[in-house]
Amino acid sequence: MISLSVLNKMILSLLSLCLLGGCQKNTKTTHITDTSQAVDTAEVEYYNSTKAPEWTWREGIKMDAYLLTNDAEHTMESTILNGSDTATISFWIKPATNVPDLPLISVVNDQAEIMKLTNLTAREEGTLQGMALQMKAEGQEQWLISNSEFTLNTHRYNQVVLVFQATQVSVYLNGQPAMNGQIGASINQIEKSWLVVGKDAIAYGDCMEGQFQDFQIRKKALSAAEVEDEFDRFYPEVLLSEITIPNAEDLQENLTLYPEVDSQYEAQWTSSNPTFLKVENNAGVITKPTVEQGDQEVTLTLTTKVKNRSFQRDYLITIRAETPATKLLRDVKALPITLGTLLNAGSSLPTIAENGSQIEWKVISGNLRLEKNVLIKTHPEEERVPVQLEATLMQGELKDTLTMDAVVLDAYAGYILSYFNGDLGKETGKFAYSQDGLHWTDLNQGKSILTSNLGTGRVRDPFIGRDKEGKFVILATEGYDNPSIYVWKSEDLVNFSDHGLHRVAWFDKGLYSTGSRAWAPEMTYDPETGDYVIYYSDAQDPKSGSMFAVTTQDFATFTYPMALFNPGYKVIDGTILRMHGQYWMLYKDEREAAQTIFYTSTQDLSQGFTRRYDDLFIYNRKYIEGPFTLPSLHEPGVYYLYVDNYPNQCFYIARFSQLGETADFQWLAEGEYTLPNEDVRHGSAIPVTQKELDRILQAYN
């Protein structure tokens, strides 16, 4: 599966512009005009900081870029803008977010007269429009505003061009005219002007985050045809620079090779070694080498053409033989995923990894000892014991060592189910409990437990998870069409704290995100990055996979969303579990022909889910959604899958121990399980210890 990635960020230290009256820090100001690359220095000006990393100049886009952050300042003085009635400003920019009203560029002089170009514009009535140009001159202010189609794609380079001819200005986005009109004053009336990239030079509020490059100011006013031609000449290269192949260092699965780079450009794929990686029917079909053949390196080349110009990019791919070294490498990567960061006293640590590596364990720190690989607390009264473990993995004479931080809880003794119901607009969260994961009893006599006076107050799709310390975190959807989610924290699921309502969804044309929904939020912990990954769905756009994710470390501040899973059709209701060294996500396929549950997998959450299993139905009924899983406490390695048959307001349950090509779903008869009442909607379940369950029962029953 091909995905988009962000170029490596290059840290720059061009700090806040104190000259312009908006500086709040004691920082150094850098103003640079570098025209050394222009044939005629009177005709073209470049932004080229001497503090930036060195790069090789060539026609068009450079692979290196300037970083846009709150701590980086990029300013230049323009002779052309000061002294000409005609000028063209052009640059390529890759924003990290699409938050409204962030500036792309601003122009200011010592009289505080200003021109500012912003990306996405929020109107007072709450609607969104696209790019906006604000011009202040001689005491008057004028605006040009485009529709919402003209807003930058995030995580991809965009070309922005402003063309000035006396008092007429035209703004182009990616080769197409976004807006044009009169601005009331010629650009040369802004005398002694400084230009600032990514910030409002006067207000100094939030800055545009991301990267930019190839910033030019030309004395000439480019025509629409010239703007479009310049975009066409370089945009294919921009697209190629963004495409990566996940797991290229150890490719184990066939690749989906899309037949086009973008809707405009055809993609042609070729392989340097078809014996081990053959391009066939828009797929990269691998043949694994034998041990005797050894690891194989293959160059996969992607070529695209536009207007008789050819662009290409090479990808180095390694297809490994099943040698002891390969098996050890894979087991070292898989073990932290399989193990997780929460363990249980009395449970056994694995002695054989997924690919056959032998494992020896050692306690490095913590009130814990091992007896024949069984975890024994040295202070049984401690409910959450932080420990550090060392695992030595061995394949014959080869070995590698991992150190892992974990928290040891008591043995699990039962489960808590979270669900919602209630009249439309008055939904609340409720709890039930079970000792076997199949037969449930309501808590609090079926009355509300999760309520909120924030936002709409509607609590839907409540999910209970644990943080890396073993404490509970509860997430829920705010209503139906809302971009924010509820968060609660709890030590015991009786007392709740840090209740908040946090926006996680944003309108983003490039991600196919409407920004109006954050359905069914759930979370998991990524030990590789140290982040909690909160994922949700936004399924209004038919082109979108609709599973998005933000990360957080404190459940109070969240990153901008990324596309976690995009199969090319609408999906909702994702739920993630760890199994056999991989992350697996079960989800609902929203296509009318499906309306059922499939699943997908990855070994790297930061790359998103890439391998999907949607060719075989796992259940023979349509109109099922809201999947959640829980481990069996009585059969190690066995899980239960619950799915919501929403037309009939009932759940179906399967047991399984394998996913992927060897999935073994066994659906239970309806008499083998009971739900707490007849109106259980979109639940989640989590195992709890006996002490936790006792406190919960005492509080609610």
Image (cartoon, rainbow, N blue to C red):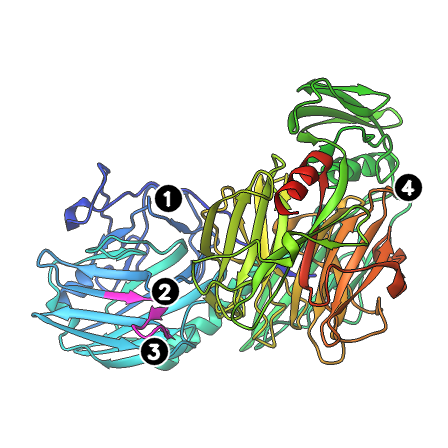
The CA distance from mark 2 to mark 4 is 55 Å
Q: Is residue 342 left or right of residue 428?
A: right
- N-terminal of the two: label 3 or label 1? 1
Between residue 597 and residue 382, name the one nearer to us: 382
Q: Is residue 117 visible?
A: yes
Q: Quadrant of residue 148?
A: bottom left
Percent from the top left, x then y, of residue 364?
Answer: 69, 19
Task: Name which residue lies at 90% across and 64% down.
Answer: 669
Mark 1 vs mark 2: in front: 2
What amino acid type is highlighted by mark number 3? Ser
What amino acid type is highlighted by mark number 2? Pro
Mark 3 vs mark 1: in front: 3
The CA distance from mark 4 to mark 3 is 60 Å
Q: Is residue 7 visible?
A: no
Give the residue number, with chain letter if any, for mark 1: 52
Give the residue number, with chain letter if any, for mark 4: 291
**Residue 146 circle label:** 3
Percent from the top left, x then y, of residue 330?
Answer: 78, 40
Percent from the top left, x then y, of residue 532?
Answer: 57, 45
Element under disc 3: loop
Q: Is residue 527 above or below residue 377?
A: below
* Span of residues in magenta: 116-130
Circle 3 residues within 10 Å: few <14, some 14–19, many ≥20 = many
All told, the count of numbered labels is 4
Q: Say if mark 3 contacts mark 1, CB within 8 Å.
A: no
The CA distance from mark 3 to mark 1 is 33 Å
Mark 4 vs mark 3: in front: 3
Q: Is residue 373 above or below residue 97?
A: above
What amino acid type is highlighted by mark number 1? Ala
- N-terminal of the two: label 3 or label 2? 2
